[in-house]
Amino acid sequence: MTVLKVLVYPEKSLLQPSVKVDNIDDELRQLIDNMGETMFDAPGVGLAAPQVGINKRVIVYDVNARSKEDDETPEIKEEFRALINPEIISASGSTVSKEEGCLSVLDYNADVKRYEKVSIRALNLEGRKLEFNVEGIPAIIMQHEIDHLDGILFIDRISVLKRAMYKKKINKQLKNQ
Ligand code: NI
């Protein structure tokens, strides 16, 4: 397994929609393994393929993300799951606002409104159709990661003013490099 380079805003592949996967082959399985490794190395709780420069509809997430937040003991085994062509088929509950960050958005966190509960449809690594409901932290992770597949970053879901300030900061940093 290899730790991949995580691209950061304003890299192009982060801003464009990804294509559906129609073939689950060794290359894809390799990509998913590497994405899992990269996510834990960062560390993060979710990662989408466009973040490593591959515009395919694939995400990985840390299955223990919730327990890690609730639990003081950090000794939880690293375990991730991959979803292929994930979609949100329904969303419910009041919207919750939680502070989010992203491995592709450097030095910045902001509150983002998300649905409390979502129903997800996806394929697993064996190509089997899955449908399941998530709520709380995993629901936020799913919405954040699926957004990546549509070229949307969490900074696209904050106020125009906050986004403009962030972009200004990044452009300044890029100029000074
Ligand atoms: Ni992200």
Image (cartoon, helix red, strand yellow):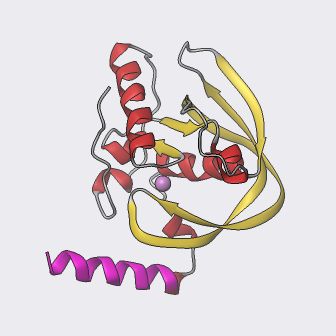
Q: How many marks?
A: 0
Give the x, y percent position of residue 117: 79, 49
Residue occupying the point 74% across, 27% down: 131
Residue occupying the point 57% across, 39% down: 62
The furthest residue to the right? 93
Vertical relation: 108 (above or below) 138: below
Which of 34/21 is in front? Answer: 34
The furthest residue to the left? 177
Give the x, y percent position of residue 140: 66, 53
Give the x, y percent position of residue 149: 48, 45
Name the quadrant containing residue 122.
top right
Which of 106/58 is in front? Answer: 106
Residue occupying the point 50% across, 37% down: 59
Q: What is the span of residues highlighted in magenta in the rendered image?
A: 162-177
Q: Is residue 68 magenta?
A: no
Q: Quadrant of the N terminus?
A: top left
- Magenta residues, dominant SS class: helix
Vertical relation: 80 (above or below) 53: above
Q: Is residue 169 magenta?
A: yes
Give the x, y percent position of residue 17: 43, 47
Residue occupying the point 76% across, 51% down: 136
Q: Quadrant of the C terminus?
A: bottom left
Name the quadrant containing residue 53.
top left
Please state if 12 lies on the left or on the right of 73 as rendered. Answer: left
Which of 75/38 is in front? Answer: 75
